[in-house]
Amino acid sequence: MQLTRALFDEVMVPNYAPSPIIPVRGLGSRLWDQQDREFIDFAGGIAVNCLGHCHPVLVNALTEQANKLWHLSNTMTNEPALALAQRLVDTTFAEKVYFANSGAEANEAALKLVRRVALNKFGAEKSQIIAFKMGFHGRTLFTVTVGGQPAYSDGFGPKPADIDHAEYNNLDSLKALISDRTCAVVLEPLQGEGGIISPSKEFIQGVRELCDQHNALLVFDEVQSGVGRTGELYAYMGLGVTPDVLTTAKALGGGFPIGAMLTTTELAKHLVVGTHGSTYGGNPLACAVALAAYDTVNTPEVLNGVKAREKLFKDALHAINAKYQVFSEVRGQGLLIGAALNTEWAGKSRDFMLAAAEQGLLVLMAGYNVVRFAPSLVIPEQDIVDGMARFDAAIAKLVAARG
């Protein structure tokens, strides 16, 4: 059987529109497709492949655990889950950990937790959840409703109730919605899908203060911003604000599916036996790989290297923009970077993504007006130089075609 892109259209549900490229192997920040064409990877599996492809530490962890134990279910615990939970507790504000398989599941757990805490402590009327427009928190019906993009949640029948949306970086917008009925405020400490938007210091500190005033919990969705992506282990560490609940996934497993919700003992006690669960969450295979990825990232060398690479990326993007005048702004933190298109190129981020692929470079979109970069945190500097040369060539071709 020929495994081609055409086969996707025959056998797969059509909710995706994947590229014609089918990668078959990867090493570091390079990929090769079925025709053995080489690509430089600035996409990183959408901020998942924090150590690139086939990093030896992850391959060894996976292979070693695969020869020991794969799955038990949560009728028992296991050593890799205990080791990873201990590491997460030791390196963050958290005292308790719940494991899931994805960011959406970690967020689902967080949302159920905050509702249960509010019910137990204050009563059923304290149920409002406030999130932010253009936020993204997953694709379950609950998380997609909390996410502030109606296009993703419309058309599936009645939505979970008592969810409102403020404007990101607009404290007055939050003040207009928050009250003693609010059980939680949920946000990304660096908006990803919404366009790579960093919070202002005044905004993020103001959100914390408003939550405290109204006995509302603060939930940070660090699915995309966590595990070294911003140059901090978690983005909250660079903001001077500590959440009550934090969710993490994507880079946590370095490419192996795993998610986690982190919180305090005081809050965790409200999820008593039977209130929530996951068949695969915390399985030995995922936790062994995640611990290897986490420990590899959580070093001064890697975290400081992220900040050095951020400068290389941004300097290169500014140089490209000086030649072609296509971006209005280069923004983001660490190696979650967005190049916002100017009015002349508005709505064309997909064109940039496709043009880059033609030149052997994989990039992402963050909406139709932002080109997103989320490469390996340890991408070699030469790969950045080579990749930016390919991006330059892609933009040159787009500009030339426009005349």
Image (cartoon, rainbow, N blue to C red):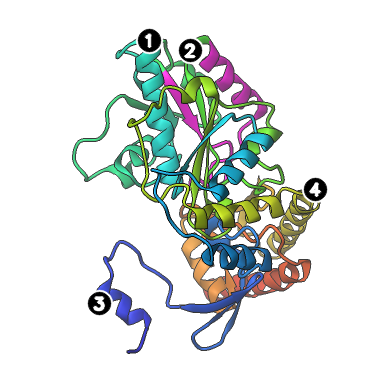
Q: Which mark is residue 110?
A: none
Q: Identify the element where label 1 is drawn.
A: helix
Residue 296 rendering spot, x and y as whole percentages? 71, 55
Type of amino acid under label 4: Pro
- What residue sits 48% from the left and 12% below the top? 215
Q: In this view, does 170 lie above or below 123?
A: below
Q: Disc 3 or 4, which lies upstream in sequence?
A: 3
Residue 263 rendering spot, x and y as whole percentages? 53, 29
Q: Which mark is residue 10?
A: 3
Q: Residue 215 carries which label?
A: 2
Q: Which of 345 and 185 is in front in this view?
A: 185
Type of amino acid under label 1: Phe
Q: Which of marks 1 and 2 is in front?
A: 1
Number of other residues with Cα within 10 Å of mark 1, as a class: few under 14, some 14 to 19, many 20 or more: some
- Residue at the spot of label 4: 300
Q: How far apart are marks 2 and 4 (CA)?
A: 36 Å
- Residue at the spot of label 1: 122
The span picked out in magenta is 183-212
Q: Is 114 contained in the magenta span? A: no
- Mark 3 touches mark 2? (CB < 8 Å): no
Q: Identify the element where label 3 is drawn.
A: helix
Residue 250 rendering spot, x and y as whole percentages? 53, 52
